Image (spheres, helix red, strand yellow):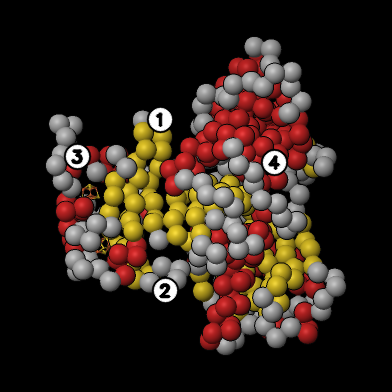
Amino acid sequence: MSEQSNGANKPEFWRWQENVWADESRDWRAAKAITVGIDVGSVSSQCVIVADGELYAYNSMRTGNNSPDSAKNAFKGVTEKTGLTLNDVHMVVGTGYGRVNVPFSHKAITEIACHARGANYMGGNGVRTILDMGGQDCKAIHCDEKGKVTNFLMNDKCAAGTGRGMEVISDLMQIPIAELGPRSFDVDVEPEAVSSVCVVFAKSEALGLLKAGYTKNKVIAAYCQAMAERVVSLLERIGVEEGFFITGGIAKNPGVVKRIEKLLGIQAMNTKIDSQIAGALGAALFANTLVTKQGALAPIAF
Amino acid sequence: MIANYGYKDGSGEYYISIDTDRCISCAAGRACLTGCPKGMFENMTDDYDDEVVQVKQQFRRNLAYDCADCKPSGGHASLPCTTACTPGAIKHSW
Ligand code: SF4
Ligand code: SF4
């Protein structure tokens, strides 16, 4: 992916790929239950449509200036792709830090429960430990075979080990964010992790390393290693069980994922589904269960 | 469910964990709510519709400081929260 530009033609290296997808092999009109999950995070927002309990469509985009608009825009992206309207939807569940500000949701469920439920769908009922590396927080979750949370821990005190931290490094190095992971392996020797896990200090430390003669790739490798060490220390607090699954945007960065796997001595499970939609997918699946139990609810217009 | 609230920073790990399965049929009459002098705990309905307690949002990033009065540097035999919670649902990591 090449870098994009803003209006002033300044390259935006941090900008990750926004994505709209629908299952062209199915027709939502044939489904008995259409449910929606909206995940409004601090950095990205997703809308997922589930038809009869199966993933049907999604939109993943950057969070805008406010949560209600981000939720509406995320939903709008899917409606444009599928032709579906709010009147066709049987229930909407909001999640993420902006979950209480989704104007058309019937219920709000925490991202912890939703990520566990989404990971259970994406990775199967063998998933037991979930690491969610979101935009500005990081969560370690244990779940049972049904995707029900049994233990969780969340770090939202600083942006270290999160997508926002990676965006900062991408901009600083002037390298498109999708290239950071692969480039982190293109080094003569694996460097030590940057010593600071704080994004602000890591930034000045990264500049110092460049001045000291480190290549950009080596600085990126040192930052990926620091992120990996940071999240592994979080995971170690609750322990890691077999069936290890990573959700969130950083799951797409092999530079961090491979280093986490090495530190833990365990391989993360694979999925063909975009790791960033796990929370919204879980929310839509919760909505599907509620429709099955309680029946459909009238749409809340926005 | 074990819910861990808190953080890890350069000075250490500061987590309060609550075994929420014990809160569902609390045998202590929710004594944690009044037992903590700072009022750090509150009732909530969790995502699975169980009535449990949680650490209030505003305390989760400052536990080392907020709990300091209960943990004098000379050491402590017991904490008001863990003493009040006779079902043994509350644990501190530090
Ligand atoms: S006293 Fe203990 S078991 Fe009862 S609600 Fe409080 S934390 Fe839960
Ligand atoms: S240590 Fe003291 S301030 Fe901290 S939770 Fe327990 S009772 Fe409250």
Tell me the residue that label 2 is attached to.
Answer: B49
- The residue that appears at 77% across and 79% down in the rendered structure is A28
Secondary structure beneath label 4: loop
Secondary structure beneath label 2: loop
Tell me the residue that label 3 is attached to.
Answer: B71
In the image, is residue B9 above or below residue B31?
Answer: above
In the image, is residue A21 above or below residue A181?
Answer: below
- The residue that appears at 59% across and 21% down in the rendered structure is A192
Q: In the depicted view, which residue is nearer to us: A152 or B59?
A: A152
The location of residue B13, given as percent across then percent down, is 37, 38
Measured in 3D between alpha carbons, the distance from the residue under mark 4 to the one under mark 2, in whole angstroms, is 36 Å
Measured in 3D between alpha carbons, the distance from the residue under mark 4 to the one under mark 1, in whole angstroms, is 26 Å
Q: In which quarter of the image is the N terminus of chain A?
A: top right
Please rate how many residues cluster around mark 1, counting C-alpha atoms within 10 Å: few if below 14, some from 14 to 19, many from 20.
Answer: few
Please rate how many residues cluster around mark 4, counting C-alpha atoms within 10 Å: few if below 14, some from 14 to 19, many from 20.
Answer: some
Q: In the depicted view, which residue is nearer to us: A292 or A261?
A: A261
Precedes in sequence: disc 3 or disc 2 = 2
Residue B10 — which label?
1
For the residues beneath circles 1 and 2, the answer to whether they share a chain is yes
